[in-house]
């Protein structure tokens, strides 16, 4: 017996956690219920229960109005536990905390332009961290892929390729640091213009294998879906410092600093997961919006701290040793980041299992609601607008600089960055009880990053001003819950 329907759209639904499948362009015709499919095409009876063929709603001439529920229920019952382990987005370091700055040396005023390139070759979140890749999920994915004109052998090759994927981030920025002094006070401004990209990365060899699999099919592999680019202003830092000590070889400044969220916020597509669309156009739109929200949560670049104000204090010092041939620079700061609204993906806690779903009769009026509930608890994490209190940021920098011929200054130092655990304070949706959500699985844990850096500067001193050209780089040697990145930068500055 043959049943006329197309399971291609279910591939998108059930493999959403492999976001790369949003890069497979499926023609609109592939959603039409006009292809022939037989359950006998499957080799493993574990996934397709032959008893559904005896369902009175399945007739030789095709499926009736509730055909979608029959198909969806049959496939969803293979998911034994939530696919997602957590929905925390990847975290990288803000540009404001990238370049070590030493403005305790200014006498009247200073302007530095830093042209930098920063790359996080591996973010702290991978597909294996995000999803439960148990054997049944993997086998189900292979099974569904076989219905996409892909052989069993190809499906077995394709799934492991996507599990190798990592998330990368690249930033190019022009960071401006300006400061002026008046008597014992100094005011500084730091801001940037950035172009940032996040992407899913697999090796060129694996990409070629995927492209070869789809060669000659009505589906193509579109690499443009594997990355997102954003450019614009970053956040802005304002500093007010007081020079408390300034002797011949020692300078000590304390002060306050504020962070203004001048960067663009990240917003996820607004998807209503409280119901399941029944008609085909609405269903396609609903699935695509869910996929985009998941993808954007993972690879949407952040130019700043996503709309949060901040306020903190800093301590900076400079010590001249051996007749100014050696300088020791230190900077310590703590910034308190205030609450603000963000969009986050948060799964509902599990209230219905696949076995309970399988027991609900097809003609039960509660089945659509049960399926919707199962999907938002196990497959699609819905987006919510939430009020978040990010963790405070501690930064410590120490640097030894060696003066050579009073023109060259070479330095090496250590950079520590710690951001405390964030706290989701409120779910800005009165229809949802926060206790029904897996909030802890959407909160960023404490992030710690250790770096070493080095820079070389060449200065030209004039009577009333000095010019400086410098080249620097840093590299992460240890981190937790934050990506490992490296930076190179060119500094062009002038002091007055």
Image (tube, rainbow, N blue to C red):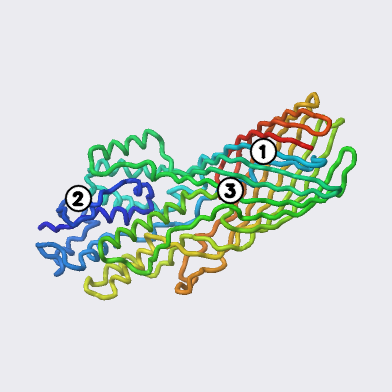
Q: Quadrant of the C terminus?
A: top right
Q: Position of residue 346 (x, y in %)?
A: 46, 62
Mark earlier in primary sequence (3, 2): 2
Which callout, 2 or 1, points to the residue nearer the camera?
1
Residue picked out by circle 2: 43
Q: Dot 1, how many residues are within 10 Å of its Cα: few (below 14), some (14-19), or many (20+)?
A: some
Judge whether 75 appears above or below 227 on screen: below
Residue 233 image label: 3
Would you identify the image quadrant in which residue 70 lies? Answer: bottom left
Element type where label 3 sits in the image: strand
- In primary-sequence order, the first of circles 3 and 1 is 1
Instruction: Name the residue rendered at 27%, 48% in the picture.
Output: 26
Image point 90% across, 38% down: which residue?
248
Task: Confirm whether residue 352 shows in the render.
Answer: no
Q: Is residue 481 left or right of residue 366?
A: right
Between the residue at mark 3 and the residue at mark 1, the CA separation in whole angstroms equals 15 Å
Helix, strand or loop under label 1: strand
Residue 278 placement (x, y as % from top left): 27, 66
């Amino acid at each position: 017996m043959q049943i006329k329907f197309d399971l291609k759209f279910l591939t998108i639904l059930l493999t959403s956690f492999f976001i790369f499948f949003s890069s497979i362009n499926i023609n609109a015709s592939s959603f039409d219920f006009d292809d022939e499919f037989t359950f006998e095409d499957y080799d493993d009876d574990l996934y397709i229960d032959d008893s559904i063929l005896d369902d009175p709603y399945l007739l030789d001439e095709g499926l009736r109005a509730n055909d979608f529920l029959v198909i969806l229920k049959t496939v969803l019952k293979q998911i034994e536990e939530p696919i997602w382990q957590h929905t925390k987005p990847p975290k990288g370091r803000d540009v404001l905390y990238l370049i070590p700055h030493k403005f305790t040396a200014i006498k009247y005023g200073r302007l530095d332009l830093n042209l930098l390139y920063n790359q996080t070759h591996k973010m702290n979140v991978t597909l294996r961290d995000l999803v439960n890749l148990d054997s049944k999920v993997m086998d189900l994915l292979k099974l569904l892929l076989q219905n996409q004109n892909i052989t069993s052998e190809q499906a077995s090759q394709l799934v492991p390729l996507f599990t190798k994927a990592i998330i990368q981030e690249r930033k190019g920025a022009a960071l401006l640091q300006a400061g002026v002094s008046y008597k014992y006070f100094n005011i500084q401004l730091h801001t940037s213009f950035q172009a940032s990209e996040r992407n899913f990365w697999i090796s060129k060899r694996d990409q070629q294998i995927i492209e070869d699999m789809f060669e000659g099919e009505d589906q193509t592999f579109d690499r443009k879906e594997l990355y997102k680019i954003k450019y614009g202003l970053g956040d802005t830092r304002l500093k007010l410092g007081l020079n408390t000590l300034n002797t011949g070889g020692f300078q000590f400044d304390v002060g306050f600093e504020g962070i203004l969220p001048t960067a663009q916020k990240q917003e996820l597509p607004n998807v209503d997961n409280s119901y399941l669309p029944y008609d085909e156009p609405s269903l396609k739109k609903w699935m695509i919006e869910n996929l985009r929200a998941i993808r954007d949560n993972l690879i949407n670049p952040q130019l700043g701290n996503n709309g949060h104000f901040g306020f903190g204090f800093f301590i900076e010092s400079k010590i001249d040793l051996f007749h100014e041939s050696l300088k020791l620079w230190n900077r310590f700061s703590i910034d308190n980041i205030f609450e603000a609204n963000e969009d986050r993906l948060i799964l509902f806690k599990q209230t219905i299992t696949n076995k309970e779903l399988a027991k609900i009769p097809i003609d039960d009026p509660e089945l659509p609601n049960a399926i919707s509930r199962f999907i938002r608890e196990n497959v699609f994490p819905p987006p919510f607008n939430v009020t978040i209190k990010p963790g405070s940021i501690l930064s410590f920098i120490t640097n030894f600089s060696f003066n050579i011929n009073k023109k060259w200054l070479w330095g090496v130092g250590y950079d520590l960055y710690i951001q405390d655990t964030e706290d989701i304070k409120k779910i800005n949706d009165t229809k949802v009880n926060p206790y029904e959500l897996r909030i802890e699985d959407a909160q960023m844990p404490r992030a710690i990053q250790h770096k070493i850096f080095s820079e070389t500067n060449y200065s030209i001193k004039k009577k009333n001003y000095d010019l400086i050209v410098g080249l620097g780089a840093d590299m992460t040697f240890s981190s937790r819950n934050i990506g490992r990145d490296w930076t190179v930068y060119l500094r062009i500055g002038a002091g007055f």
